[in-house]
Image: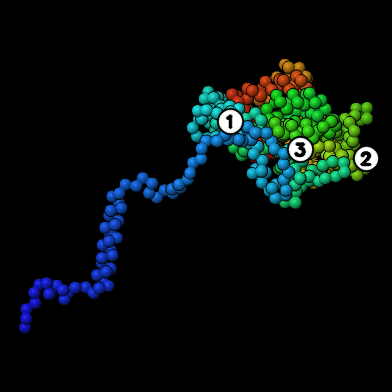
């Protein structure tokens, strides 16, 4: 028998072809893995996006451009936060910016302690709001536009309010809401308030005067939220008379409803109503209930000033589930610079103690000028000036 050589013996003991192929494949994967593990790749495992970068262009935001004329459909009103670029003001965390955008102030490094423990506050004095009326929340009538809840459930309060960032409404910093009323009656003083006061000061417009819608839209373009001042029966009426179509305590509900709708139709763009006088009506539960029921059905909120000490509005609004807030003081009850400054200083102390506070005043020269100077000091004191809508949201309530 012929003796086989070593080569022939090894050849006869070779593995089947499929086994050999599998072994070879494993060897290839093992070698490839060893090679990859030794090749440096700093972006391994990270998502990478390739994008073309356009040339520098001027950035236009709500802080640099005026509000545009526009009307919204019901679908557009679904997300007013997306529709209205109203918030140039924002809370920014992280590193301090070296430079601020035009017209924007950055809190200094030596600002009050509360700011250092939270976030950097960027303050823009005017944040444009959209023009009114917005069609989705407007009922057109022969006497004028009336607020209404949109078919998608959006309310005038939602659409006409500033979109205040949650980082502001939920901040631990003291917050002050200030509403100055009497706007629209004196065009000069109204213009002065619009131009000289920061946008976070809310303006109350009386339902009388000329070109009210134009004045309201000018105020909104400067960032001011708007409330409608509704004349309500005071003690001593009609000797003391707030004005035409005053809501009365001893008339049929239908009569007050007609008067209220006339008052509401004078202009559009307000997120709520506030009383003008009313010491008699506000203690007449039946009359007040019918009035507040109409306010609720129109998608508005109610703010009561501090001029009336006795009122049934807390009980009535609670029963109706109508959002309500009440101011704690009138800052210009004594219209002198020292008295207004003292009232503002008390507001600061109350805000620091309670977290938030609401006050009202009137659109007098002396009030506008004193508030304008005072507002310039709030940033360094670590105090937030917020629009009235913020008082109905978050921790500002």
Residue placed most toward the observer, 180 or 382: 180
The residue under the point 53% across, 31% down is 117
Extreme residue in the front direction: 55
Q: Tell me the element at label 3.
A: loop
| Quadrant of the image occupied by residue 340 | top right
To which residue does mark 3 refer? 270
Question: Which of label 3 and label 2 is nearer to you?
Answer: 3
> Does 109 appear above or below 165?
above
Residue placed most toward the observer, 307 or 298: 298
Left or right of 304 on screen, residue 247: right
The residue under the point 69% across, 47% down is 76
Q: Is residue 328 visible?
A: no
The residue under the point 25% across, 67% down is 23
Percent from the top left, x then y, of residue 195? Answer: 71, 26
Checking the image for residue 392, the label placed there is none
Mark 3 or 2 closer to N-term?
Answer: 2
Mark 1 or 3 closer to N-term?
Answer: 1
Q: Tell me the element at label 2.
A: loop
| Quadrant of the image occupied by residue 27 | bottom left
To which residue does mark 2 refer? 251
Percent from the top left, x then y, of residue 335? Answer: 78, 19
Q: Quadrant of the C terminus?
A: top right
């Amino acid at each position: 028998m012929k003796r086989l050589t070593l080569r022939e013996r090894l050849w006869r003991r070779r593995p089947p072809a499929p086994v050999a192929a599998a072994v070879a494949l494993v060897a290839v994967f093992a070698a490839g893995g060893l090679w990859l593990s030794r090749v440096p790749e700093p972006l391994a495992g990270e998502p990478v996006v390739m994008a073309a970068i356009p040339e520098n262009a001027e950035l236009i935001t709500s802080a640099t451009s005026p509000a545009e004329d526009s009307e919204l459909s019901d679908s557009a009103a679904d997300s007013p936060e997306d529709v209205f670029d109203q918030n140039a003001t924002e809370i920014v965390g992280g590193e301090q910016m070296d430079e601020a955008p035009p017209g924007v102030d950055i809190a200094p490094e030596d600002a009050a302690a509360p700011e250092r423990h939270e976030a950097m506050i960027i303050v823009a004095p005017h944040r444009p709001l959209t023009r009114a009326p917005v069609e989705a929340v407007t009922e057109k009538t022969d006497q004028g536009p009336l607020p209404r809840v949109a078919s998608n459930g959006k309310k005038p309060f939602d659409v006409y309010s500033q979109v205040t960032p949650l980082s502001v409404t939920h901040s631990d910093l003291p917050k002050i809401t200030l509403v100055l009323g009497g706007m629209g009656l004196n065009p000069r003083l109204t213009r002065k308030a619009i131009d000289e006061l920061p946008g976070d000061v809310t303006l109350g417009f009386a339902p009388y005067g000329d070109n009210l819608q134009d004045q309201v839209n000018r105020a909104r373009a400067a960032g001011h939220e708007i409330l409608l001042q509704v004349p309500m029966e005071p003690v001593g009426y009609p000797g003391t008379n707030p004005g035409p179509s005053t809501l009365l305590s001893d008339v049929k509900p239908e009569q007050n409803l007609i008067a209220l709708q006339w008052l509401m139709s004078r202009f559009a763009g307000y997120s709520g109503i506030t009383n003008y006088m009313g010491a008699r009506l506000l203690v007449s539960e039946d009359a007040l209930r019918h009035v507040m029921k109409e306010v609720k059905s129109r998608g508005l909120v109610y703010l009561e000033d501090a001029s009336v000490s006795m009122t049934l509005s807390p009980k009535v609004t609670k029963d109706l589930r109508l959002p309500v807030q009440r101011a704690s003081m009138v800052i210009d009850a004594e219209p002198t610079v020292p008295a207004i400054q003292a009232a503002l200083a008390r507001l600061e102390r109350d805000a620091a103690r309670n977290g938030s506070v609401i006050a009202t005043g009137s659109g007098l020269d002396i009030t506008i000028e004193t508030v304008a100077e005072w507002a310039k000091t709030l940033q360094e004191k670590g105090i937030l000036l917020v629009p009235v809508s913020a008082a109905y949201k978050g921790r500002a309530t």
